[in-house]
Image (cartoon, helix red, strand yellow):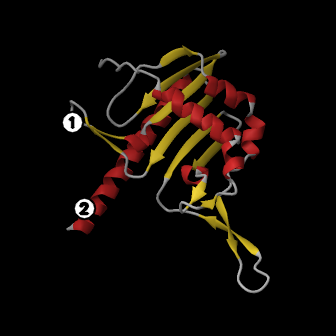
Amino acid sequence: MCKLLIVFFIFICRATFAQNEVRLYNTITDLQQQGVDTFLVFNNYTNGDILPPTAQNCIIDANEIFFLYWIYKGSASVIRIDNCYAYQPIVNLQSAFVKGFNENLKKLNKELIKPLTYLQPGKGKKKKWNRVNVYVDHSSYYSIQYITPANTIRKTYDLFDLQAVYDDSLANENYKYNSNTLTVKLANLAAAETRGFSFMLKEKP
């Protein structure tokens, strides 16, 4: 019975993800037809993160909430996309996230987030130190996509790699480097910025 529930949950999550991605790219297509050609998509994913049911008994999958920014004639706008509601965009937006991303495209495109790494003492008389990279299967990540007709940049990083220590005692050698990357700074800026938005529901036709 437990296995059946797990399979059912995975199926629902995948169906929701597909539905939300369709809504996201349909929105991008509609905007492209209006002459918009530059987009930024921000998404914060946490494994198994689901919000409580709303008044309409629709359960919002917090992992599949997308914030779609677009730039048109020098002005930025943003809209929230999830699996329950349609929202009105916020227009003429002064976005530090959008500005910072546009000003640092080349550097961001080359930048990499390094894995959580700690030093482990070697064995034997020489006892050389070995660097150990740590990876996890289930974690949280921030994802940003920059989309234009000529280029697409996708920056995704695991929040696990931003831990200062591993296993409560081993220092993450890449913590300082990762924390100071533009990728991390701008993703944190996007996370804070989107938490402050209040979107109006779109009226039904």
- Residue 133 can be seen, yes or no: yes
The label on residue 5 is 2
- Residue at position x 46%, y 20% from top? 89
The label on residue 57 is 1
Q: Nearer the viewer, residue 65 or 46?
A: 46
Position of the N terminus by quadrant? bottom left
- Residue at position x 21%, y 36% from top? 57
At label 1, which amino acid type do we have? Answer: Asn
- Residue at position x 54%, y 36% from top? 42
Quadrant in which residue 170 is drawn: bottom right
Of labels 2 and 1, earlier in sequence is: 2
The label on residue 65 is none
- Horizontal side, residue 1 vs residue 149: left or right: left
Secondary structure, mark 2, is helix
Give the image location of residue 47, x and y in percent.
Answer: 42, 52
At label 2, which amino acid type do we have? Answer: Leu
Give the image location of residue 12, x and y in percent.
Answer: 31, 52
Secondary structure, mark 1, is loop
- Horizontal side, residue 19 vs residue 178: left or right: left
